Image: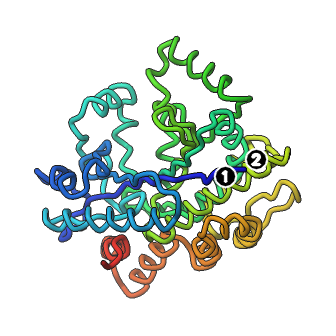
Amino acid sequence: MVDTISIGIEEEYLLVHPETRELARLQPAGFMDRCKDLLGDRVMHEMLQSQVEIGTGVCNTIDEARAELLELRQGVAAVAREFDTCIVAASTHPWSLWSEQEPVDMERYRIMGVEQASIARRMAICGMHIHAGIPDKDLRIDLMNQVCYFMPHLLALSGSSPFWEGIDTGLKSMRPTIAGHLPRSGLPETFDNWNDWMEMVDDMQATGMIKDPSKIWWDLRPSMRHPTLEIRICDVCTSVEDGLTVAALYQCLLTFLAHLRENNQRWRQYRRILILENKWRAQRYGIDALLGDFGKREAVPFPELIDELVELLRPHAEALDCVEEVENAREIARRGSSADHQLRVYNAALSAGASEREAQVAVVDWLIEASVPAE
């Protein structure tokens, strides 16, 4: 019998000035200390001073994750207000320049800056990472091989980065392009088992290519610090509930695939180039994408694929008590992700006579309001 697959959620936020709405290039002195006083080690630095990261503990249910995410978002937002800043849960800022952001003065970020040069400094992006607890190492690898197929679906639901350095990019998610400039990024390879994965890691370490597996920045990877399978493909969701929907889908997908394995079945694996094409379409069009259904050999509207996925996962959602969150995927697939709403706000402001910058400010105003649920 498959044990409950626990989850842990990490989110990254941007810090912005409430008056200019630009990124806070320098983090206010004492900000992180105050966050840690209030929330402990669940709040962390990220690469740039204009970013802050939070991470929940191990959660067995989506309700547990909700309670902790709300506490963390509201807590960090409250501290930000104390220091005359605001938090924004979006994967890019509409216009602030990466080249003007200051890195955090910590050894690991200094090393990354030396190794990756200007590529590291370009990481003025925020994501949502979800860890799924899978103690069996070989099962972890097997599920990674299978669940990779669904990574584009989760990306499309989470899109929140349509702008980059003052430009409407035409994408629903610009973040994967920026993150994709890092080495060892993108979709993972497939592996026969845990030993196969470790042989690759050992080869990379022996040749000095990496010091540890945390330098493999794939969209989906086994964690070496925790007995988890971590997805990293998603934008951070502006709505807490949308983020919980993505987490619920991931938990249910892994449970579904683990049950298949118990019955000597598995999800068919497809060529990497096919999944990469779906990833690009999810990044470009979001919920408006036609994604490949490779079993049917058809391009299918994204909302239809989500309808099928929700029904497929329903028995597991019922068992995990997250039917409402999984059902919310249908709502996102029809009304849009954060990226769609940002674009609606932006275009409505332009239509009303606003300048480009005024329309971008309207987007930031909406993000500030929507990122932090009322207590």
Give the quadrant of the C terminus: bottom left
Can residue 99 be seen here? Answer: no
Query: Which quarter of the figure has residue 328?
Result: bottom right
Q: Amino acid at mark 1?
A: Leu
Q: Residue at the spot x=48%, y=56% of the render?
A: 59
Closest to the observer, 292 or 107? 107
Q: Image check: 164 left or right of 284?
A: left
Name the disc covering residue 274, or none. Answer: 2
Q: Position of residue 287 (x, y in %)?
A: 63, 69
- Asked which colour scheme the image uses, the reply is rainbow
Disc 1 marks which residue? 254
- Which of pointers 2 and 1 indicates the residue nearer the eye? 1
Closest to the observer, 239 or 254? 254
Tag 1's secondary structure? Answer: helix
Q: Residue at the spot x=34%, y=58% of the render?
A: 13
Q: Residue at the spot x=59%, y=76% of the render?
A: 324
Above/below status of 118 relative to 330: above
Q: Position of residue 123 (x, y in %)?
A: 38, 44
Above/below status of 126 relative to 163: above
Label tally:
2
